[in-house]
Image (spheres, rainbow, N blue to C red):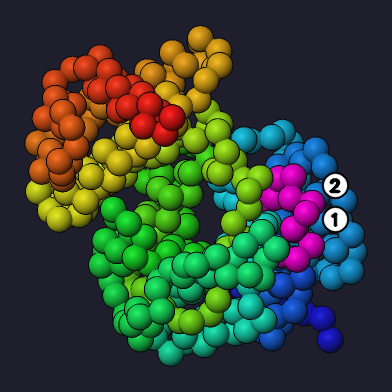
């Protein structure tokens, strides 16, 4: 007999122009060995057949709850939070529309939560090729990680700073989203989820792990894998993360040091991305250079300089932004000449 009781788990899925893969993502939820779930899918005004595919699956299974944003938001962040807002369950699991999960994923994570009384249970991200099956060469956490570990939220968050020793994807108590929303900054672009992930971890009293597998597709069409001005949003994210890390760990902590190096690596990566991309409109290039400048001014160079290694002219990078640009451009020119 049907009841009005809310489901135990809400799977939340933002979707945008995901017609190639979303049926597999939805199918992986429908195939779960644990059946007390709902799947809340929020379409961000897709221009392909994504919305039609979502509706077709919703007609087959009433546990699938479709919703459409009134206008395109430009990132997965707002549709994901809308899905969380619509979710009815105590426990939230995030799934992207081009990824999928193993059949026992929800069952394994919920069992681990009941065993540990954790606020968050993190699963294992397994990278797969675009076909969704072929291994892509990495897992997070790696196979040697102690999946029996139980950490505080602060300890778990530390393992995401500088590099992702663990991932932030798993079973999360809905209450933590409510806590995180009180500290979340304004929408900061395509990788706003990275900031939200740290807020969720810091709000957790206890974080556990399990070997439930989440298959992360290496999608060549993803906006994070081709040039887009939106990719430069991560510079702002790193600035906000720097402030967050200093607040929770202290300005002289190991975490603050790793965050400073992460911010530097982001600056260098985006500088190379900009100056290796020809034929950008003058106004676009100028606006992106302003983002680089803001990050350059925000970097803790005293902390970063010992980590620059033996890069040529590294001691000059912090002196002047114009000099910094000249060094980066000179290095790129030297690389091009060497390839010829």
- Above or below, 1 against 77 in this view is below
Badge 2: few (under 14), some or many (20 or more) residues near its Cα, within 10 Å?
few
- Above or below, 239 against 198 in this view is above
- At 84% from the left edge and 63% from the top edge, which residue is drawn? 58
Residue 298 visible within the image: yes
Q: Mark 2 and mark 1: span between their CA atoms?
A: 6 Å
> Is label 2 in contact with label 1 (beta carbons under 8 Å)?
yes
Depth check, front residue: 123 or 197: 123
Please name the residue that numbered disc 2 is placed on.
Answer: 49
Question: Which stretch did the figure color magenta?
Answer: 10-26
Residue 203 visible within the image: no
Q: Where does the image place residue 47, in percent across and percent down from the top left?
A: 80, 38
Q: Where does the image place residue 44, in percent across and percent down from the top left?
A: 70, 42
Q: Residue furthest top?
A: 282
Where does the N terminus fall, quadrant-wise?
bottom right
Is 24 within the magenta? yes
Q: Where does the image place residue 327, in percent across and percent down from the top left?
A: 25, 23
- At 36% from the left edge and 32% from the top edge, which residue is drawn? 338
Depth check, front residue: 148 or 3: 148
Please name the residue that numbered disc 1 is placed on.
Answer: 53
Q: Count numbered badges in the picture.
A: 2
Q: Quadrant of residue 22?
A: bottom right
Where does the C terminus fall, quadrant-wise?
top left
Q: Where does the image place residue 270, in percent across and percent down from the top left?
A: 40, 33
Badge 1: few (under 14), some or many (20 or more) residues near its Cα, within 10 Å?
some
- At 17% from the left edge and 49% from the top edge, which residue is drawn? 257
Task: Name the secondary structure under disc 2.
Answer: loop
Left or right: residue 31 versus residue 288 is right
Task: Name the secondary structure under disc 1.
Answer: helix
Is 41 within the magenta? no
Q: Residue furthest front?
A: 340
């Amino acid at each position: 007999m049907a009841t009005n009781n809310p489901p135990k788990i809400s799977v939340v899925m933002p979707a945008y122009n995901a017609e190639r893969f979303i049926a597999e993502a939805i199918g992986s939820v429908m195939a779960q060995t644990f059946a007390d779930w709902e799947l809340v899918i929020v379409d961000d005004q897709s221009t392909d057949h994504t919305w039609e595919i979502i509706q077709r699956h919703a007609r087959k299974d009433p546990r699938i709850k479709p919703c459409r944003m009134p206008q395109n938001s430009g990132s997965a962040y707002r549709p994901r939070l809308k899905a969380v807002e619509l979710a009815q369950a105590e426990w939230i699991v995030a799934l992207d529309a081009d990824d999928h999960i193993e059949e026992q994923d929800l069952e394994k994570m919920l069992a681990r939560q009941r065993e540990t009384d954790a606020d968050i249970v993190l699963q294992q991200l397994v990278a797969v090729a675009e076909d969704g099956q072929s291994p892509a060469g990495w897992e997070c956490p790696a196979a040697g990680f102690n999946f029996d570990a139980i950490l505080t939220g602060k300890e778990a968050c530390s393992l995401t700073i500088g590099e992702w020793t663990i991932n932030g994807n798993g079973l999360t108590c809905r209450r933590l989203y409510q806590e995180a929303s009180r500290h979340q900054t304004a929408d900061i672009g395509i990788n706003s989820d990275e900031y939200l992930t740290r807020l969720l971890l810091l709000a957790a009293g206890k974080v556990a792990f399990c070997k439930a597998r989440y298959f992360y597709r290496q999608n060549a069409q993803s906006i994070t894998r081709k040039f887009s001005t939106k990719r430069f949003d991560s510079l702002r994210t790193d600035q906000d993360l720097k402030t967050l890390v200093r607040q929770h760990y202290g300005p002289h902590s190991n975490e603050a040091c790793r965050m400073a190096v992460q911010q530097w690596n982001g600056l260098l990566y985006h500088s190379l991305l900009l100056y290796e991309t020809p034929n950008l409109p003058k106004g676009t290039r100028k606006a992106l250079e302003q983002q680089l400048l803001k990050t350059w001014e925000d970097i803790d160079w005293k902390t970063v300089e010992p980590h620059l290694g033996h890069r040529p002219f590294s001691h000059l990078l912090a002196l002047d932004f114009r000099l910094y640009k000249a060094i980066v451009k000179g290095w790129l020119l030297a690389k091009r000449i060497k390839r010829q």
